[in-house]
Image: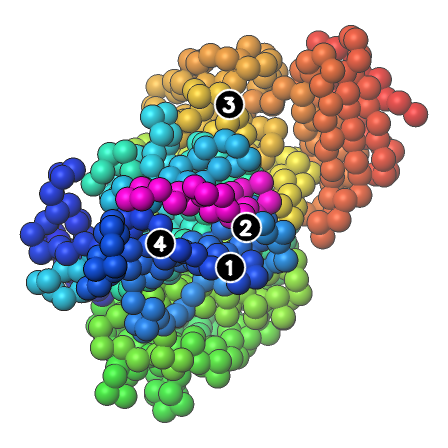
C-alpha cells in the first residue's frame, strides 16, 4: 500500500510528489532555503502582444550591484481577452518538458502602455500593472478599475534548497479581508479553501480525506477572478496557510506559468476558464436517466442481473442504463475486455435482450492490463505498455497481479486500445465506466513521447478518457458519447460525465460528496454524479431514501455499491416508492434539465453548482455547501438528517417549492422537516420551469405538451427559456415579462399544445 511521510520540507509518496514550505513564520526562511526574490523593475521590452520585464533580486544603486545576482524574467501574454498569462523564469535554459494542458488561442486586442511609474498590460477589460518604483516590485491585477489582487514584497521568488539541491518557483497573490478561495478540483475537505494546504496529485483516496481523484490547478474567488497554474504536475497551494494573507502556489523547477482569468464575475470566470480549456461535450439525453449496476464485488450472472431489471419493472421503477462492473471479466484478467465465459456464456445475446427492454449498456474498464490478460503479451511485444528507463515494462501487483499500463502517449497504443473497445461496441455496449487512472508511476519511467513522468501522473487521465471518448464519438456519433469517469485533470470536463468516487453509506459522506461536486463544478465540469446511498458498506433504509432524492436531482444518477446490491427492495418497500417518485420527477424535468445541459455545453456553465455563482452579491451565499443550484432556476437542499430536518438559505425574492407548492420569502434561513416524499426544491423568482409530459424515459419530445410552470415575478422582471430537442437544438422559446398584475408570455416554436401552471400571484396572459 502507499504510505505518506510528512516532514518540514516534503512528503514522499509511492508515486512521487512533495509538499514544500519555504518560510519559518513571516520574517525567517527555513535554514536550507536560498531565495531570489523579485525586488524591483529594471527594464522591459515589447514584442508584438508580449511584454517581458526584467526583475533583479536586489535594489540596484550602482553598476557594481548588477554583478553576481539572480534575476527573474517575467513575461506577460494573452491567449484571449480577459486572460493574461504570466511566465516567471529564473534560468531559461533549464529543461522544461510537457505534457501541457491544451488551451485555446484566440486573437485578442492587447494594449501595452507605460508611464514614468508603471507598465500596463491590457487584455479586454483585464489589466496587469507593473510598478517601476525602486525596491518596490509589484504586479497588480484589475478588472477595469476594480483592484483584484497583487504580488509584491517577497512574493514572486525562486527558491533553492541547498540540502536537496532542488529549485522551486513560487508566487503569492494577496487575499482580501472578505475574500474566499474555491475550487482546485473535486475536494472533499471544507468547501472554502482558506486555511488549507492543497496538492495537485491524483490518488485513489475515497471521499473522506484531503486526497482527490480530480485535481485541477484552477481556483476562483468570490471577488470574481480565477487563476489557472499552467502545470499539470505536482503543484502545491498554500491558501492563507503559510502566509495567511496570501495564496501561494509553487512548482519544482526554474519556471512558473499561470493564467490570470477575469470574466467579470465568479460565473463569468468559470465560463471564461472553459473558453480557455474546453467546453463539456453534450451527453445524450438517455444518459440522464437512472443507471443501475451490479455493484463491485457481488456475485452475479445473467440470471441475477435480469432479476434486478425485472424487479424494477415489476415495481414500475423506470430504468434506463444497466452497468456491469469489474467482474464481467474473469478475476486476474482485468483488463482483457472478454466476457467471463463461465458467468456470461452468451454476452451478445444477453445485451440484445436488454436492448429489447429499452436499456442502454455500460461496462467497467480501466487502463491497466494484468499479466494474466491475453492483452499483456500483445501490448508488451508491440511496445504499447509504459516502460521503465531500461526498456523493460513497468509492472505492479497493486490492484492486478503483474499489471502494466497502456502508454497513451503512443498513438498506436491508443488506437490498439480503441480497437479492443470497439469489439465491445459492436457487441452492443453503449458506453464505458472509465475507472481509475490515478495510480500512475513516476519513478524510473520513460514514456513513448518522453513526457515528464511527474506531469504525466495527473495528465495520464486526460489522455485515457480522451481516447475512450473519441472512440465513442466516432462509433456512436457526436451527442451520443458519454463516460462515467472517476479521475480528471485540466480539460477533462470535455469528456463527461464524472462521478465522485468511493463514498460511504453515511450522511456525513453524503455531505462531503456534495462538497466535492460543488468544488469540481468550479473547474468547468458541467456533468457530475455519485454513488447513490454510498459505495462502502450498506446504507440504512433512511439514508438510501434521502440519497435517492439527492441522486435524482443531480445531472446523472447511478445506484452503485461495493459488496452489496443497491436495488431498493433490499432496503424496504417504501424505498421502491421513493425511488420511483424521483425517477418520475427527473424524467418530467428533462425539458428543463436538458436545456440547462445545452447551456453547459455552449457556455461552460456547470449544471450543478454552488450558490455564490448565481448570487455573488449575497454574502450569505459565500459559504453554502449543503445546498446548490440545479441549473438557473432550481435550488435544491438535500436532507442530511434522519429527523428529516433541513436548514437552507433563500436569497431575496419569493420562491416556490415545486413539490409542495409552498411559497417562501427569501433573504433569510429556513428550517423545515420533510418526509421522504419531499425536500426543498425551490423555483427561483422571475423564472419559468418547463416540465415534460413523460415520467418514464429521459429522452422524448420535450416540447410536446410541455407545461410551463410560472413562478413569482417582480415588477418589470423579464426572462427567457429555451426548450431543446434531444439533439440539443432549440425547438421552443418562451419569453415572459411582468407588466402590472400580469405576466405576459410570448411563445415561439413548439407544437402549440403547451399547458400553463401558475404558481405566482399574478395572472398569466399569452400574447399572440
**Residue plotted at (27% across, 41% down):** 153
Q: Is mark 1 on a helix, strand or loop?
A: strand
Q: Which segment is the magenta one?
A: 113-136
Whether 357 is among the magenta residues is no
User: In which image quadrant can residue 339 be found?
Assistant: bottom left
In this view, the residue in front, 253 or 228, is: 253
Q: Distance between the residues labelled 3 and 1?
A: 39 Å
Residue carrying label 4:
42
Residue 408 visible to an observer of this rendering: yes
Q: Which of marks 2 and 4 is in front?
A: 4
The mark that comes first in sequence, 3 or 1, is 1
Q: How crowded is mark 1: few (under 14 residues within 10 Å), some or many (20 or more)?
A: few
Q: Is mark 4 on a helix, strand or loop?
A: loop
Say the numbered circle drawn on residue 112.
2
Residue 451 x %, y %: 36, 75
Residue carrying label 3:
617
Which quadrant would the C terminus be assigned to in this image?
top right
In this view, the residue in front, 203 or 118, is: 118
**Residue plotted at (60% across, 13% down):** 654
Residue carrying label 1:
46
Q: Are marks 3 and 2 in contact (CB under 8 Å)?
A: no
Q: Is mark 2 on a helix, strand or loop?
A: strand
Q: Residues within 10 Å of mark 4 (few under 14, many from 20)?
A: some
Q: Residues within 10 Å of mark 2 (few under 14, many from 20)?
A: some
Q: How far apart are marks 2 and 4 (CA)?
A: 17 Å
The mark that comes first in sequence, 1 or 2, is 1
Amino acid at each position: 500500500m502507499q504510505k505518506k511521510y510528512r516532514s518540514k520540507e516534503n512528503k514522499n509518496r509511492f508515486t512521487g510528489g512533495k509538499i514544500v514550505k519555504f518560510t519559518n513564520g513571516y520574517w525567517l526562511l527555513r535554514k536550507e532555503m536560498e531565495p531570489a526574490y523579485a525586488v524591483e523593475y529594471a527594464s522591459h521590452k515589447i514584442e508584438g502582444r508580449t511584454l517581458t520585464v526584467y526583475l533583479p533580486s536586489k535594489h540596484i544603486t550602482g553598476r557594481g550591484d548588477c554583478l553576481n545576482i539572480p534575476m527573474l524574467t517575467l513575461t506577460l501574454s494573452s491567449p484571449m481577452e480577459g486572460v493574461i498569462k504570466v511566465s516567471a523564469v529564473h534560468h531559461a535554459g533549464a529543461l522544461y518538458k510537457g505534457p501541457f494542458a491544451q488551451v485555446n488561442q484566440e486573437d485578442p486586442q492587447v494594449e501595452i502602455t507605460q508611464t514614468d511609474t508603471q507598465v500596463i498590460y491590457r487584455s479586454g477589460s483585464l489589466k496587469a500593472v507593473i510598478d517601476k518604483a525602486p525596491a518596490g516590485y509589484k504586479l497588480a491585477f484589475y478588472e477595469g478599475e476594480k483592484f483584484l489582487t497583487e504580488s509584491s514584497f517577497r512574493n514572486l521568488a525562486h527558491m533553492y534548497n541547498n540540502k536537496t539541491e532542488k529549485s522551486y518557483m513560487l508566487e503569492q497573490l494577496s487575499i482580501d479581508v472578505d475574500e474566499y478561495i474555491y475550487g482546485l478540483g473535486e475536494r472533499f475537505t471544507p468547501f472554502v479553501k482558506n486555511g488549507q494546504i492543497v496538492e495537485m496529485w491524483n490518488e485513489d483516496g475515497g471521499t473522506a480525506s484531503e486526497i482527490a481523484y480530480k485535481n485541477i490547478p484552477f481556483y476562483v474567488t468570490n471577488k470574481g477572478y480565477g487563476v489557472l497554474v499552467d502545470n499539470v504536475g505536482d503543484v502545491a497551494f498554500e491558501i492563507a496557510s503559510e502566509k495567511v494573507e496570501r495564496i501561494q502556489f509553487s512548482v519544482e523547477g526554474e519556471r512558473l506559468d499561470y493564467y490570470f482569468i477575469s470574466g467579470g464575475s465568479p460565473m463569468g470566470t468559470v465560463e471564461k476558464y472553459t473558453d480557455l480549456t474546453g467546453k463539456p461535450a453534450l451527453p445524450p439525453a438517455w444518459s440522464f436517466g437512472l443507471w443501475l449496476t451490479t455493484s463491485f464485488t457481488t456475485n452475479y450472472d445473467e440470471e441475477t442481473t435480469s432479476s434486478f431489471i425485472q424487479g424494477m419493472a415489476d415495481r414500475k421503477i423506470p430504468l434506463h442504463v444497466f452497468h456491469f462492473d469489474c467482474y464481467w471479466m474473469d478475476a486476474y484478467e482485468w483488463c482483457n475486455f472478454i466476457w467471463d465465459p463461465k458467468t456470461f456464456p452468451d454476452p451478445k445475446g444477453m445485451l440484445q435482450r436488454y436492448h429489447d427492454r429499452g436499456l442502454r449498456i455500460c461496462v467497467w474498464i480501466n487502463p491497466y492490463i494484468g499479466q494474466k490478460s491475453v492483452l499483456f503479451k500483445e501490448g508488451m511485444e508491440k511496445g504499447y505498455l509504459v516502460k521503465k528507463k531500461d526498456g523493460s515494462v513497468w509492472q505492479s501487483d497493486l490492484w492486478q497481479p503483474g499489471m502494466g499500463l497502456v502508454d497513451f502517449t503512443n498513438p498506436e497504443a491508443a488506437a490498439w486500445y480503441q480497437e479492443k473497445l470497439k469489439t465491445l461496441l459492436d457487441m452492443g455496449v453503449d458506453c464505458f465506466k472509465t475507472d481509475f487512472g490515478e495510480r500512475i508511476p513516476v519513478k524510473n519511467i520513460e514514456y513513448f513521447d518522453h513526457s515528464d513522468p511527474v506531469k504525466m501522473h495527473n495528465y495520464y487521465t486526460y489522455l485515457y478518457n480522451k481516447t475512450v471518448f473519441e472512440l465513442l464519438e466516432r462509433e456512436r456519433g457526436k451527442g451520443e458519447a458519454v463516460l462515467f469517469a472517476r479521475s480528471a485533470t485540466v480539460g477533462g470536463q470535455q469528456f463527461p460525465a464524472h462521478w465522485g468516487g468511493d463514498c460511504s453509506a453515511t450522511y456525513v459522506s453524503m455531505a462531503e460528496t456534495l462538497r466535492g461536486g460543488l468544488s469540481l463544478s468550479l473547474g468547468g465540469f458541467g456533468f457530475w454524479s455519485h454513488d447513490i446511498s454510498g459505495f462502502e458498506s450498506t446504507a440504512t433504509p433512511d439514508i438510501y431514501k434521502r440519497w435517492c432524492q439527492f441522486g435524482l436531482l443531480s445531472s446523472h444518477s447511478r445506484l452503485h455499491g461495493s459488496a452489496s446490491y443497491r436495488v431498493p427492495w433490499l432496503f424496504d418497500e417504501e424505498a421502491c416508492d421513493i425511488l420511483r417518485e424521483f425517477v418520475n420527477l427527473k424524467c418530467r424535468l428533462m425539458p428543463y434539465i436538458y436545456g440547462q445541459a445545452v447551456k453547459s455545453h455552449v457556455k461552460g456553465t456547470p449544471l450543478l453548482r454552488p450558490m455564490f455563482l448565481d448570487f455573488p452579491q449575497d454574502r450569505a451565499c459565500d459559504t453554502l455547501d449543503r445546498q446548490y443550484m440545479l441549473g438557473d432556476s432550481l435550488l435544491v437542499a438535500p436532507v442530511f438528517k434522519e429527523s428529516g430536518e433541513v436548514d437552507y438559505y433563500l436569497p431575496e425574492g419569493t420562491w416556490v417549492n415545486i413539490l409542495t407548492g409552498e411559497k417562501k420569502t427569501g433573504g433569510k434561513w429556513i428550517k423545515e422537516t420533510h418526509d421522504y416524499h419531499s425536500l426543498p426544491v425551490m423555483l427561483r423568482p422571475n423564472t419559468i420551469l418547463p416540465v415534460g409530459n413523460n415520467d418514464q424515459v429521459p429522452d422524448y419530445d420535450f416540447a410536446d405538451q410541455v407545461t410551463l410552470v410560472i413562478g413569482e415575478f417582480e415588477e418589470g422582471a423579464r426572462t427567457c427559456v429555451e426548450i431543446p430537442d434531444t439533439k440539443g437544438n432549440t425547438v421552443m422559446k418562451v419569453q415572459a415579462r411582468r407588466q402590472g398584475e400580469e405576466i405576459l408570455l410570448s411563445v415561439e416554436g413548439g407544437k402549440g399544445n403547451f399547458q400553463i401552471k401558475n404558481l405566482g400571484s399574478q395572472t398569466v396572459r399569452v400574447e399572440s
